[in-house]
């Protein structure tokens, strides 16, 4: 996989297809493999980048830093600048949604498409709780869902994985993670696709997020936290017309 050096570490990514760019951004302790069921169709018409954040997947993170959500957003900014992409669509899950929202504020030429989520901040507690929590928030419906849950649960049991997850969880209440005061600066077209049965980011959070982002639209699927892995066809039915409109008007 190609990679780009960022202030938080090397970011690895895969590229499929040609055309206007789409960047896929995963959740805490997950990886770009989460998007395996939607990449083939997206890459028929778009240059599709599946990103591994620092400390995740094939990427490496700076060893002396405790990972936080803002660190991942910093890495995304560095990646986009290094790739020198034209205006793009960003599909971000959970902390990937936060990172894409912040990018849309700091780099307003970008388009943002998000599926967002929430907070286990003490490593040893995280190591005990998260392996089972993964299965509860995934609510597996597909083989890919089950594979994701198995991989994330296994990593959450490791000392290194629990430290990464705990650092990111603990950063969610921080002022740097709270974008509500800057929501009026988010001008990019925004589609929120929420899992109705997500226990870590309940639908009430999706409704509140939609109200914060002027002009945004909220769609709900009968899934847990990773909507595009659980219901890829339904997700794409919602997302593809939105993507076409973004690039048409952009």
Image: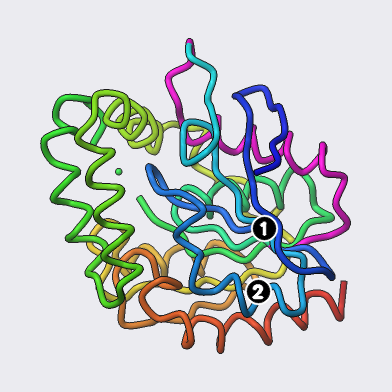
**106 lies left or right of 63:** right
**Residue 158, position as x, y percentages in the image:** 23, 30
Q: Residue at x 87, y 45 (%)?
A: 84
Identified at 30% across, 47% down, the residue is 152
Q: How is the image coloured?
A: rainbow
Q: Is residue 61 above or below residue 45?
A: above
Q: In this figure, which residue is indicated by the disc labeled 2?
A: 215
Q: Which mark is residue 23?
A: 1
Is label 2 in a helix, a strand or a loop? Answer: loop
Name the secondary structure under disc 1.
Answer: strand
- In the image, 108: left or right of 173? right
Reply yes or no: does residue 227 show up in magenta.
no
Nearer the N terminus, badge 2 or badge 1? 1
Image location of residue 65, percent across then percent down: 48, 16
Residue most extreme to the front: 1
Q: How many labels sit on residues?
A: 2
Among the 4 quarters of the image, the one containing residue 46? bottom right
Tell me which residue sits at (48%, 86%) in the image: 233
Query: Which range of residues does the magenta coloring cover?
Result: 64-89
Quadrant containing the C terminus in the rendered view: bottom right
Image quadrant holding the N terminus, namely: top right
Q: Point out residue 199 in the picture as x, y percentages from the top left corner.
A: 22, 62
The answer to whether 206 appears left or right of 107 in the picture is: left
The Cα–Cα distance between marks 2 and 1, rounded to whole angstroms, is 22 Å
Q: Foreground residue, 217 or 214?
A: 217
* 12 horizontally vs 230: left or right: right
Residue 58 vs residue 9, the one in the foreground: 58
- Label 2 crowding class (10 Å Cα cut-off): few <14, some 14-19, many 20+? few
Q: Which mark is residue 64?
A: none
């Amino acid at each position: 996989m190609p990679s780009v050096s960022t202030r938080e570490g090397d970011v690895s990514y895969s590229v499929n297809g040609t055309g206007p760019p789409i960047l896929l951004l995963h959740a805490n302790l997950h990886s770009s493999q989460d998007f395996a069921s939607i990449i083939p169709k997206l890459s028929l018409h778009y240059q599709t980048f599946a990103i591994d954040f620092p400390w995740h997947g094939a990427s490496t993170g700076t060893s002396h830093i405790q990972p936080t959500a803002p660190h991942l957003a910093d890495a995304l900014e560095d990646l986009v600048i290094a790739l020198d992409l034209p205006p793009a669509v960003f599909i971000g899950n959970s902390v990937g949604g936060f990172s894409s929202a912040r990018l849309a504020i700091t780099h307003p030429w970008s388009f943002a498409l998000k599926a967002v989520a929430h907070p286990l901040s003490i490593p040893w507690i995280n190591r005990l709780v998260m392996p089972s929590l993964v299965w509860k928030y995934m609510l597996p419906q597909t083989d890919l869902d089950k594979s994701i849950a198995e991989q994330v649960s296994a990593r959450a049991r490791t000392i290194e994985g629990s430290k990464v997850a705990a650092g990111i969880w603990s950063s969610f209440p921080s002022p740097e993670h709270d974008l509500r005061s800057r929501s009026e600066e988010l001008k990019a077209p925004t589609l929120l696709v929420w899992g109705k049965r997500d226990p870590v980011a309940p639908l009430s959070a999706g409704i509140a997020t939609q109200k914060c982002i002027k002009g945004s639209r909220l769609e709900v699927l009968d899934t847990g936290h990773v909507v595009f892995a659980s219901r890829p066809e339904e997700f794409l039915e919602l997302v593809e017309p939105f993507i076409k409109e973004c690039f048409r008007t952009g």
